[in-house]
Amino acid sequence: MSVLSLLRRREAGIALALLVVIGVTTAIQPGFLLSAGGWRDLLLTPSILVVLAVGQAVVVITRNVDLSVGSVLGLTAYLTGRLFIDAPDLPIVVVALVAVAAGTLLGLLNGSIVAFARVPALVITLGTLYVYRGVTLTWAGSDRIDAGDMPRAFLGLGTRQVLGVPVLTFIAAIVLVAVAYYLYTARGGRQLYAIGSDPDAAALQGLPVRRRLLWAFALNGALAGLAGVMFAARYGTVSSGAGAGLELQVVGAVVVGGVAIFGGSGTAVGAALGAMLLLTINRALPVVGIPDFWQRAVVGALIIGAIALDRVLANRRSRRLAAARDAEPPPGSAPPGSAPPGGGPNDAGPDDREEATA
Amino acid sequence: MPNATPTLRLEGVAKSFGPVAALRSGTLIVQPGSIHALVGENGAGKSTLVKIVGGVHRRDAGVVELDGEPVDFHGPAEAKAAGVAVIHQEPASFPDLTVAENIFLGREPLGRFRRIDRRAMREGVRELFRNLGVDLDPDRPAEGLSIADQQIVEIAKAISLDARLLVMDEPTAALSAVEVRRLFAVARGLRDAGHAVVFISHRLDEVADLCDTVTVMRDGEHVSTDAVADVTPDQLVRRMVGREVAELYPKVPSTPGEVVLQVEGLESTGTFHDVSFEVRAGEIVGLAGLVGAGRSEIARAVFGVDRYDAGRVVVGGRNLRQGDPAAAIAAGLALVPEDRRLQGLVTESSVARNVSAVSRRRLARLGILLPDAEARLARDWSGRLEVKAGALDAVTTTMSGGNQQKVVLAKWLATGPKVLIVDEPTRGIDVGTKAEVHRLLSTLAAEGLAVLMISSELPEVLGMADRVLVVREGRIAAELSRAEATPEAVMRAATPGASESESAA
């Protein structure tokens, strides 16, 4: 892929916006980037949202959405803490795997209802958002898991850095690379795009639509489970309200990252950049001196702006492709010289007009 | 050859959709190394038969065997796995994927670690396109491809499957003469390699040129199977139609009055170009053309649903604002859309609600819609159109296609239109109701209504229209009077690449 085509990609615009935000804020307050804490925050703050956004992108590409991720994160974060308390002998890796497995199950449940009952994902996952949260509330009650309940080594994951990069950021990066690679290079990945692009045609082609949808929701659930573990490690306290309202931020990040909400296009990298942009702006606005009230408005404007931009780009593309089609010697693309004598069908144009007005 | 096991044996296959029998008794026996033509009018059941072979529909009754093995496909994937490749009439491509991805979807060449090998995929597509003699960029998105190019992509996809049975449902409908020749060369190559090919076409010259055997279908039933050399095109046509056109279409002669609808230089990038025509009071003008030629799009633009880039629409001497269906209705336009379930009806609503849907403002008193007024209107019109419904509050979902169409017609006639645009007025309607709809349109025209009728059924257009406009690739390719409008003349004007001598028509 040439540098030019790389620059013309949708993701380049988001990356540019991110760089501008960081640049401007650093110019006003150098500590935003050029201090140990600033650098760490820049990378650490978005890492959980990046994991969630990458998972959500996979679902949105199939023309679905999963609103339950905040609740899944809450449930798995609490599960993580509970396991440390109730089974103190379990290794940290096993605890993390159990939480991821739990997230996978919850995602599978979403996916099965969507794939088999054919009810829109928006409605289903809005329902499971409340159900999963209800489970956590019943289970946890007013109980709260504190830093003291969890092993030091685990909490260290939330703060430790390797080679100047926080561990959680490493995890997010690995997730991003793996999912992006899968979406671009695997047959299954391309089929997710096909399903989102035209579900009916996908069925007509004999693609395993249900299996792929189940898979997409399961993956998203697994990543939400992983995000739950990361949440517990990062904040050290987990209450029954952990992750509440996060789903909107996730969907916002995905949309800002250029994943079309009607499916079929977008990338994991875009979604991750969207998550970074959203949270970095959140931190930058107070530094730049924008009052609280406007900070949320700016985030909202960003989301609306991203959707509007997508619309404009899509319209421009289909107009350009349509215009290119008009310019071609119709139909299709017979090479010049091989056309039948008498020329293309277009030659009859003027005669017809005379006929029509006669 | 007769001793060989046929690649496809399909006998006595039936399929109904609700009360409509799309296929009563389909029979098709295709030998390996043969190109078998399947011909018949629209609605003869060819496409249904193809969809059964391709695993899209499941048969209600009958036998399907592949190489002597009975098969019962539960989905397109099973058919594909069994070696059946189908090019359906409507290309189904994925606009967001590239051309290459569309062709190899689910079967992409894999490199190391089962990763898609894009270079091999691109090469494979180039190779396919070289054989087909087309020049399409494998890396461009499928969005915005012309119908012809979409067909090419479908054909490339089907050929790359290397199936033992290749079924092509009207593959040439949108292709140029050059492309058709290349496709034929490819089909012959497949035949010589021992594959079986089923070729559906309306164009009998193509059948004579390419195929060795021909099966005729009519009204969902098998009529005859012969060697192509043994039958003349005339015989085929007679078997396809099986009845005189005149008795089917009760067109009452009428004298056209003044011009009611005038369209001048209508233009929409990528869809249609420089479309000009007029419709007079008391006249039925047929808008013929191939599927995808832009007929419905023109109708939608005239009615104000879609916008256009240039040109104007004049109704009764007054300019019509574009993109404003309400103004179009006020000016006396009515549009009975192509898809009545999706666009024509609120299927969950009652007959009365549907009939009054566009006339509510007129019926309302001080902004309040009186149930009495609604019921009176509905009773009036459903009576005139002989809608068969248990009651006016019956929900339209459960009604037959023909009765639904009558409800849609009633709705628009209730607005007292000057111009009635009907898009595929009898699609999916049983024969009896079809005749009723035709009689109704004819009567309305005789009473002075201007009718613009879009239809893909050639006999319907020829039987009903006083004048035929042929649309080809978004342009009015020909205007034919009732006398001039023979099936050949219309098809020639409608088919890209068959146009050399058309302006003489």
Image: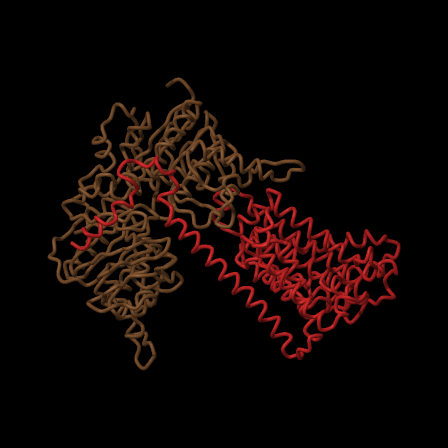
Chain colours: A red, B brown
Is A239 on the left or on the right of B141, as rendered? Answer: right
Is A231 on the left or on the right of B256, as rendered? Answer: right
Q: Quadrant of the C terminus of chain A?
A: bottom left
Frontmost residue, B317 versus B273? B273
Vertical placement of B363 versus B486: above or below? below
Vertical placement of B36 versus A160: above or below? above
Frontmost residue, A135 versus A305? A305
| Farthest bottom residue in view | B366
Asked whether residue A130 appears in the rendered view, the answer is no
Is B130 on the left or on the right of B171, as rendered? Answer: right
Task: Give residue B190's position: percent from left, percent from top.
Answer: 43, 26
Task: Give residue B65's position: percent from left, percent from top.
Answer: 44, 29
Asked whether residue B55 appears in the rendered view, the answer is yes
Residue at position x 62%, y 70% in the image: A299
Task: Give residue B366's position: percent from left, percent from top.
Answer: 32, 82
Task: Give residue B264's position: percent from left, percent from top.
Answer: 24, 60
Q: How many labels, in total?
A: 0
Vertical placement of A292 versus A144: above or below? below
Frontmost residue, B491 versus B3? B491
